[in-house]
Image (cartoon, rainbow, N blue to C red):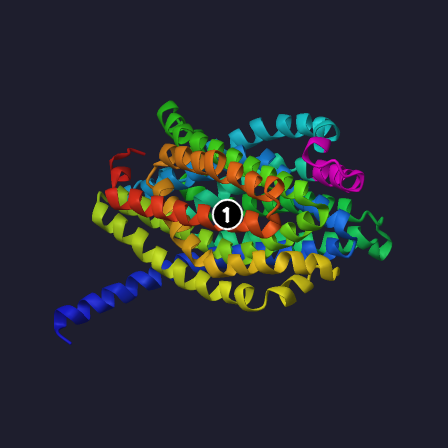
Amino acid sequence: MSDASSLAADAGESRYRTILRLALPIMGGMASQNVMNLVDTAMVGSQGDAALAAVGLSSFANFMAQAFIMGLSVGVQAMAARRLGEGRHTETAIPLNGGLLLAVALGLPVSALLFILAPSFYPFLNDDPKVIAEGVPYLQARLCAIAAVGMNFSFRGYFNGVNLSKIYMRSLLVMHATNLTLNFLLIYGHLGFPQLGATGAGVGTAIATYVGSLTYIAMGFRYARTGGFLHGLPDKATLTTMLRLSVPSGISQLFFAAGLTTLFWIVGRVGTTELAAANVIINVMLVALLPGIGLGIAAASLVGQALGRKDVDDAARWGWEVSRVAVAVLAVLGLPMLLFPAPLLGIFIDDPATIAVGTWPLRAVGASIAIDGIAQVLQASMLGAGDSRRIMIVNIGLQWCLFLPIAYLVGPILGQGLLGVWLVQVGYRILHATLMASFWRRRAWAEIKV
């Protein structure tokens, strides 16, 4: 091998080490989040199909309620990464301060309003009385933590943006350990605690979310004070830029979450058994998918920092290189779903009929999930570059104008069941990945100022 080739190989190896150094803690934290979701599902699954369906539907309704405020992380991360790349180290945490203020100012009144309205709107999501009885109190408990979710996502954006992803992982591990303990106590009534069933899972998760916020604040004082943590609010220009980046992402998240809730409504029209199976399929799918999202978060930081250095070519390379890693990781994680779907479902579902309904949809997920690695990484890379408006338009258009109408036609109307709905979703995800790759190649994102 020539000296030049050797240097190129070393540089490539170093770049992949950089990707893994940033992404592995994020992936570890997200893996812990997935494990906790699966543990919650397994615990609640012992309460029957109605409880399992209620928790699944309520979780996505809660995601819809939190989605807008979760978009704060995009603005915080993009700006923190760009400031780090520009060498403005003492200003990296100023966007975080603004994100925390907005999280509290928006989250608390929204929580109160939706808590009051939950019993009125829940029957529109599902008309099964058993699902309603289990779902409303679970949802109300989760809604109490919207402000904490906004704070946690702002911290996540900051720590990932300045290459401190290990802090993000530590905080998640504390939060999920708390969640697991409280669920064990409150679902089953162990050690003298009240036996609350599915509602106990909601209460445990809400409390654990606030524990996560306190952990993040402690970490902020330790690791972010030199970046300006709680030293001042953003000026008007910085706040305007942060809102310009965060609002489209928040709207996109809101419509995505509403779309997932609508998907559950569509599946609920097929049947409660299908709804219970769909809840488990999505949670199992996230075990494989969220590492791809974690790699995307790392890519967003690397892209933002490269653009801060005015190196567009380097930013473009990061997007493609992280995408390759994501495809490889998700392909491996999809194999168990493809090869052993029934045993996987059997971990969470007792009813053989429900397992049978979910087997082929889960197999379809396993066969196609690697393609999502391209979409997740390049979408996050564009967000890291500040191209949140384009992402919003594409995501809303694909989901609401294409996927959901076709899923409703194929599932409830044409009677193709859960498998038909999931095959439509596979096609939708392939198209999404194709569009993200096309946008990344054109490099219009490189012209955006942050």
Give the SS element for disc 1.
helix
Residue 60, x across and y down, in percent? 62, 41
- Residue 39 colored in magenta in the image: no
Q: Quadrant of residue 148?
A: top right
Q: Residues within 10 Å of mark 1 (few under 14, many from 20)?
A: some
Q: Amino acid at mark 1?
A: Gln
For image coordinates 38% across by 40% down, the residue present is 383
According to the picture, the residue beneath numbered tag 1 turns out to be 425
Q: Let me know if residue 136 is in the magenta part.
A: yes
Height in image: 405 above or below 117?
below
The residue lying at 55 percent from left, 37 percent from top is 259
Q: Is residue 272 left or right of residue 246?
A: right
Residue furthest out toward the top: 236
Q: Does the rendering let one see residue 94?
A: no
Does the magenta stretch mainly form a helix, a strand or a loop?
A: helix
Query: Which image quadrant: the N terminus?
Result: bottom left
Viewer-nearest residue: 135 or 31: 135
Give x and y (percent) for residue 82: 32, 41
- Quadrant in the rendering for residue 124: top right
| In-front residue for pair 299/90 | 299
Give the magenta range: 123-141
Outermost residue toward the right in this view: 192
* Residue 186 can be seen, yes or no: yes
Quadrant in which the C terminus is drawn: top left
**Foreground: 309 or 71?**
71
Residue 292 position, x and y percent, is 45, 55
**Image coords of residue 317 (percent x, y):** 26, 53
Q: Is residue 274 above or below residue 1?
A: above
354 to the left or right of 104: right
